[in-house]
Amino acid sequence: MSVLSKAPPHSAVVSRPPRATRRAGTGRPAAALLSPTLLVLGLVAGYPVLAAFRLSFVVSSESIDPSTGFTVTSTSYGLDNYAAVFTGERFLGPWWNTTSFALASVTLEVLIGVAMALVMHQAFRGRALVRAAILVPWAIPTAISGLLWKWIFNSQGVANELLGVKVLWSSEGFQAWLSVVIADTWKTAPFIGLLVLAGLQMIPGELYEAARVDGASSWRTFWRITLPLVRPALVVAVLFRLLDVLRMFDLPYVLVGARKHSVETLSMVAFEEMSNLRFGTAAAYASVLFLYIAVVAFAFVKLFGADLIGRGTGNPQ
């Protein structure tokens, strides 16, 4: 009997697996259970965002009252704060620093984090100690990490002693930008390694056994089995780190300092505007950064398909 004779008749209908549907009567209990969490998120996250967005349109102007001679502050609504942001000289530099930090740091963190995960996934004596040592940088607060690397990158610090040169890491220039990238990569690469390790532990060992039986090399096994199966966890880790780096403030502020154009980010500019009591301009910078992060997150999810809310394709029963 040929293979064609085994094919189903033309009248047969190939049924697709039913998609997961919400059970009847579960909508209201689910909404009731989620309402406290949504209320807290609305109070601690939603309201500040809306308040800052509203404040970004508030334009303050000062004038002298001719009858009293005192300065009078008047407020109005307009786009003057956003015009000051985009037409000023301080936007492009911080925006480029923010973007370049994200591209450089996340790329290095992915490479180092995946290597860490592969090492931690291997079975060897002392694996628990190695895992704990790798995760130590992630456990250190960012401000403390910045102080630690500030001591390392001191003019008479460890970095210059190892390099045999005198580099002023905290001064203006590429070296200041590089010091922030190195410190950020050292601290947060274990985060990506931890999430990738969780993905590696979900891969069945039978797949690697079959690959070894077929004579596949380690490199081919990594590209054909490990990387595709660990991709969902890796994509989520990269997305979280990308959003975290785009709003980076504390590390360059502690490590290099304020008003350093080589490392100044949009968050640092917004903080400085707020410190100088220019709240409308500060809110405008913060709103622009918020929209920029939202656009980057949306594009990343559309491009790489990060499943952040657990949407499935249904239960093929």
Image: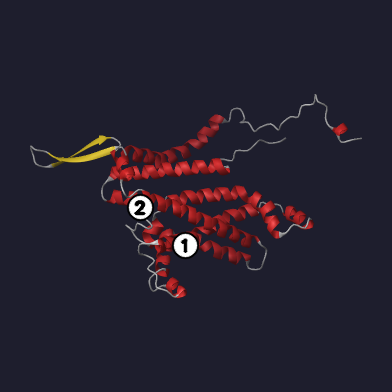
Residue 235 image offset from top left, x and y in percent? 57, 48
Q: Height in image: 75 above or below 108?
A: above
Q: What residue type is labelled 2?
A: Met
The residue positioned 51% from the left and 41% from the top of the image is: 299
Coloring basis for residues = secondary structure
Residue 187 image offset from top left, x and y in percent? 48, 60
The residue positioned 33% from the left and 50% from the top of the image is: 90
Q: Would residue 110 be found to the left or right of residue 146 on screen?
A: right
Badge 2 is on which residue?
268
Q: Height in image: 164 above or below 286?
A: below
Q: Is residue 283 something that shows in the picture?
A: no
Q: Height in image: 165 above or below 51?
A: below
Residue 226 image offset from top left, x and y in percent? 67, 53
Q: Is mark 2 on a helix, strand or loop?
A: helix
Badge 1 is on which residue?
182
Q: What residue type is labelled 1?
A: Ile
Q: Is residue 20 something that shows in the picture?
A: yes
Report the front residue among 310 and 184: 184
Q: Are marks 1 and 2 in contact (CB under 8 Å)?
A: no
- Quadrant in which the C terminus is drawn: top right
The residue positioned 63% from the left and 31% from the top of the image is: 21
Report the front residue among 210 and 260: 260
Residue 75 image offset from top left, x and y in percent? 23, 37
- Quadrant in which the N terminus is drawn: top right
Q: Would residue 257 be found to the left or right of residue 106 on screen?
A: left
Around disc 2, counting alpha carbons within 10 Å, would you say few (fewer than 14), some (14 to 19), or many (20 or more)? Answer: many
Per the model, the C-alpha gap separating discs 1 and 2 is 19 Å
Around disc 1, counting alpha carbons within 10 Å, would you say few (fewer than 14), some (14 to 19), or many (20 or more)? Answer: some
Among numbered discs 1 and 2, the one appearing first in the sequence: 1
Q: Would residue 292 be found to the left or right of residue 234 on screen?
A: left
